[in-house]
Amino acid sequence: MKNLKITSLALLLGLAVIYSCKTDPPPEPSPEEAQTALLVGTWAVSSVTFDNTARDWAGFSLAFTDGAYTSTGSPSGEEGVWKTSGTWQFVGKGTDNVNVNKFTRDDDVDVSISVIDANNLTLTFNYDEAVNGKISGITGSWVFKMTK
């Protein structure tokens, strides 16, 4: 009987040790990390509008990494809207006021993210060619709807 009590106690103590040694779940990503994870990847254009008028950007794509992007397939005469490569960062990055729905490109264009999920991305921005160099009739409001 004494051995049964000792064995039962040892078994209960062993189970308590096993259950108390669970690993903690990984920490939740910050809003910035979560939004970056959604943004990173290659996005193909589904539609583009310029000042509320549809534009033909068939074949255009954007590839985002953490802090950089590349673009391919810009139409002739509209290459300045998206440089072939550049950097980006969320507005307010490194502060308590980071805005994960807006980023600034290295050409000082602020881009708003109005829709983002695993498969869809909508980017909206105003491009001012006078600030960015060339004069070719591409100054105005741009909306890029994209899919992964």
Image: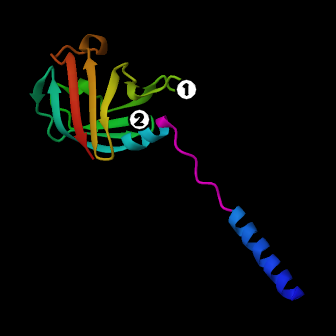
Three-letter amino acid code at disc 2? Ala
Three-letter amino acid code at disc 1? Gly
Q: Nearer the viewer, mark 2 or mark 1?
A: 1
Residue found 38% across the figure and 26% down from its top: 102
Q: Quadrant of residue 36?
A: top left
Question: Considering only vertical position in the picture, is 26 above or below 51?
Answer: below
Magenta stretch bounds: 22-32
Q: Which quadrant: the N terminus? A: bottom right
User: Which one is in front, 144 or 68?
Assistant: 144
Q: Main secondary structure of the magenta part?
A: loop
Question: Considering only vertical position in the picture, is 34 above or below 86?
Answer: below
The answer to if 28 sits in the magenta stretch is yes
Q: Label 2: few (<14), some or many (≥20) within 10 Å?
A: some
Is 73 situated left or right of 26 in this image? Answer: left
Q: Which mark is residue 103?
A: none
Instruction: Specify the farthest residue to the front.
Output: 1
The answer to if 136 sits in the magenta stretch is no
**Among the two numbered marks 2 and 1 on one chain, the one whose residue lies closer to the N terminus:** 2
Q: Which mark is residue 94?
A: 1
Q: Quadrant of residue 52?
A: top left
Q: How many marks?
A: 2
Residue found 48% across the figure and 36% down from its top: 31
Q: Quadrant of residue 131?
A: top left
Instruction: Specify the farthest residue to the right.
Output: 2
Residue found 34% across the figure and 20% down from its top: 109
Residue found 87% across the figure and 87% down from its top: 3
- The picture places residue 105, in percent across and down from the top left corner, at 38, 25
> On the image, numbered disc 2 is attached to which residue?
68
Q: Label 1: few (<14), some or many (≥20) within 10 Å?
A: few
- The picture places residue 34, in percent across and down from the top left corner, at 45, 41
Q: For the residue labelled by badge 2, is the local secondary structure a helix, a strand or a loop?
A: strand
User: Which one is in front, 148 or 11?
Assistant: 11
